[in-house]
Amino acid sequence: MRSHEIDYEIKGHDIQLVEIELDPNETVIAEAGAMLYMKEGIEFEAKMGDGSEPDKGLFGKLLSAASRKITGESIFITHFTHRGMGKSHVAFAAPYPGTIVPLDLEQLGGSVIVQRDAFLCAALGTKISMHFNRKLGSGFFGGEGFILQKLQGDGKAFIHAGGTLIEHELNGETLRVDTGCIVGYQEGVNFDIQQSGGLKSMLFGGEGLFLATLSGRGKVWLQSMPIRKLVSQLSPAGPNASKESSGGILDSLLE
């Protein structure tokens, strides 16, 4: 199924949104709860499936829903369709501070592999499926796990990166990355896990025991603030808890 051709505008800086412009009968699909606002003429429906295979039977839809459940996402995908005249708009907001990344899947070879919580929305016709990393080490120590999502199609899709987005083009070299900071990569890129250094560095270096390695050829997208780091920094028991007081040790003794 060819994807619907949609126009878009990304608005904002630290917490972005993407506004999709739809012609009559055009549809955009999105994660449940991602919609910020929609204008007149837009109707939505929650479905089990991304709609890329309209002839898929009930059993196939149930399998798709089960795979989304395994990746930690809602089993339903919301379809937003313009049923009115002229043009109309629907907007989707990022779930936490960061950057929305537009992907032209046709220009990227037809598919991109992303972290399971990175997908935001896409043109109808985009296939969203579960992707397993075949490397055993990546499965055990990959930080975000080895269950990823694959976006396939020839239209536009939008993913979300926490904090600042970093885009790299690999040309045969290897990039070592914090395991939680990978947003996505093209299929020509190999993803693996290796030790972060010697025993002392692993225990006291603060970079964790393992790093992700990205090698080969293709684009990779990284994020400076994955959600797990953000939650850790804001947690009352997190590393910044003691910084709330300017008095340091003296204040602690007086409390």
Image (cartoon, helix red, strand yellow):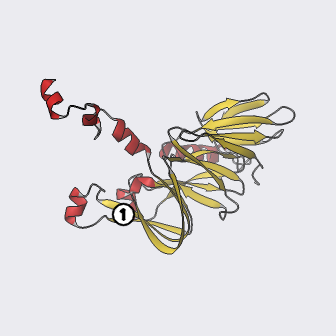
Tag 1: amino acid: Gly
Quadrant where the C terminus is found in the figure: top left
Residue at horizontal 47 percent and vertical 53 percent from the top: 147
Q: Is residue 107 above or below residue 21?
A: below
For residue 118, above or below residue 35 = below
Q: Residue furthest right?
A: 85
The residue under label 1 is 137
> In the displayed structure, does residue 84 sit left or right of residue 161?
right
- Find residue 5 and report its horizontal and vertical position in percent: 78, 49
Vertical position of residue 252 compared to residue 4: above or below: above
**Residue 45, how many percent across, how many down?**
69, 33
Where the N terminus falls, by quadrant?
A: bottom right
Q: Is residue 81 left or right of residue 229?
A: right
Secondary element type, mark 1 = helix
Percent x, y of residue 243: 27, 36
Q: At 67% from the left edge and 62% from the top edge, which residue is drawn?
A: 110
